[in-house]
Amino acid sequence: MEDSVFLTLMQNTLILILIISTPILVISMVVGLLISVFQAVTQIQESTLTFVPKIIAGILTLIVLFPWMLNMFVSRCTEMFDYIQTMIK
C-alpha cells in the first residue's frame, strides 16, 4: 500500500471521528456553560454539580442521534472499503 493511500484512509477516519463526536461534545459544552452561569449567578460553588447534567445530556444526545451516527459510520466505512478495493485492483 502506498503512503498516499494510507494517509487518505487515515484522514477519512479522523474526519469521521470528528463528525460523529461533534454533536455530543457541543451539547455537553453548552450544558456545562449553562450550569457554570447558573453557579455564578447563584454563587453555588459545588464542583461536582456540572458532571451529572453533562453526562445526562451526553447520553440523551447519543440516544437521539444514534441512528444518524450509525448511518454516517456505515456509509463512510463502505466508501473507505470501496476505495481500498479500487486501490488493490
Image (spheres, grey):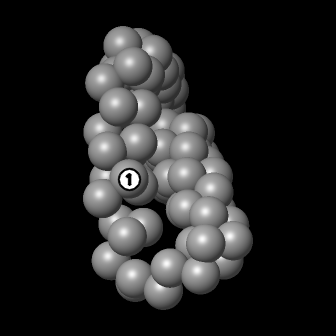
Q: Residue at x 32, y 53 (%)?
A: 55
Q: Quadrant of residue 46?
A: bottom left
Dividing the image into 4 quarters, which one contains the C terminus?
top left
Left or right: 50 in relation to 7: left
Left or right: 48 in relation to 68: left
Report the front residue among 3 and 9: 9
Look at mark 1 in the image and give the residue it sits on: 53
| Total numbered circles | 1
Q: Quadrant of residue 74?
A: top left
Label 1 residue SS: helix
Q: Is residue 74 above or below residue 23?
A: above
Report the front residue among 64 and 11: 64
Q: Residue at x 50, y 79 (%)?
A: 44
Q: Residue at x 37, y 70 (%)?
A: 49
- Give how far across and how far down residue 13 sits, in percent: 48, 46
- Give how far across and how far down residue 20 sits, in percent: 49, 38
Q: Is residue 12 visible?
A: no
Q: Residues within 10 Å of mark 1 (few under 14, many from 20)?
A: some
- Give how far across and how far down residue 80 sits, in percent: 46, 29
Q: Is residue 55 visible?
A: yes
- Looking at the picture, which amino acid does disc 1 mark? Pro
Q: Residue at x 33, y 77 (%)?
A: 48
- Give how far across and how far down residue 26 sits, in percent: 61, 49
Report the front residue among 59 and 19: 59
Q: Is residue 16 above or below residue 35?
A: above
